[in-house]
Image (cartoon, rainbow, N blue to C red):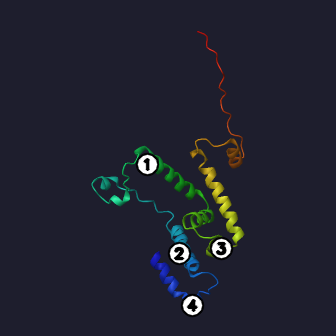
Amino acid sequence: MVQDAFIKAHKYLDKFEGNSSFYTWLYRIVMNLAIDHLRKHRRVKPVELDESKLEDGGDESLMPRILGGNPSRALMDKQIRARIDQALLELSENHRAVLVMRELEGLSYEEMAQAMDCSKGTIMSRLFHARRNMQKRLLDLLDHASPELIKDLTGEDPPAEPEIKDVNVRR
């Protein structure tokens, strides 16, 4: 896809008007190619990792080495990353795109608006709703979510905490 993007950019360089930065123009080309690729290969099943190759001294870069790391924490982090990835996949293409551009790529609202060919206000709205949808999907990862946060995200009152009664014990 990267090669295709550079070929396409070279081919249509005369169409670059200069209204936006070259980076934004090229980013939009790559983004469109990636979306087209995902749509075209949507029915393809993902390939699973063969862990036996890793155990036999295969490519160690696939499994980061954490010296003095806590295996329990590493497993928990892996599970959280998987949940975040799953939540991202459940978002609409527009919401996923603005989250990735803003949070991972660090693009400004203006750059995002140019890349997605929409207004800055639309970007701000999409980003707000994308973040909110991610919060809803990942709410259960919080150990002690406040009742206000639960009600704000779900629109429902949180389940009541069981009352702990003070019991006097006689001896």
Residue beneath label 1, please? Answer: 74
Rounded to the nearest angstrom, the CA distance separating label 3 from label 2 is 18 Å
Residue located at (65% from left, 26% from top): 164
SS state under label 1 = helix
Which one is in front, 145 or 91?
A: 145
Residue located at (71% from left, 44% from top): 148
Q: Position of residue 39 (x, y in %)?
A: 54, 68
Which of marks 2 and 3 precedes in the sequence?
2
Rounded to the nearest angstrom, the CA distance separating label 1 from label 4 is 50 Å
- Depicted 58 relative to depicted 157: above or below: below
Rounded to the nearest angstrom, the CA distance separating label 2 from label 1 is 33 Å
Q: Nearer the viewer, mark 2 or mark 1?
A: 1
Residue at the extreme bottom: 14
Residue beneath label 4, please? Answer: 14
The reply to whether discs 2 and 4 touch (Cβ–Cβ < 8 Å) is: no
Q: Mark 1: give few (<14), some (14-19) or many (20+) Cα within 10 Å.
A: few
SS state under label 4 = helix
Type of amino acid under label 3: Glu
**Which quadrant does the C terminus fall into?**
top right
Which of marks 4 and 2 precedes in the sequence?
4
Which of marks 3 and 4 precedes in the sequence?
4
Q: Say which mark, if any, is on residue 30.
A: 2
Type of amino acid under label 1: Ala
Q: Mark 3: give few (<14), some (14-19) or many (20+) Cα within 10 Å.
A: some
Which of marks 1 and 2 precedes in the sequence?
2
The reply to whether discs 1 and 4 touch (Cβ–Cβ < 8 Å) is: no
Which one is in front, 54 or 32?
A: 54
Which of marks 4 and 1 precedes in the sequence?
4
Rounded to the nearest angstrom, the CA distance separating label 2 from label 4 is 17 Å
Q: Is residue 130 found left or right of 13 in the rendered image?
A: right
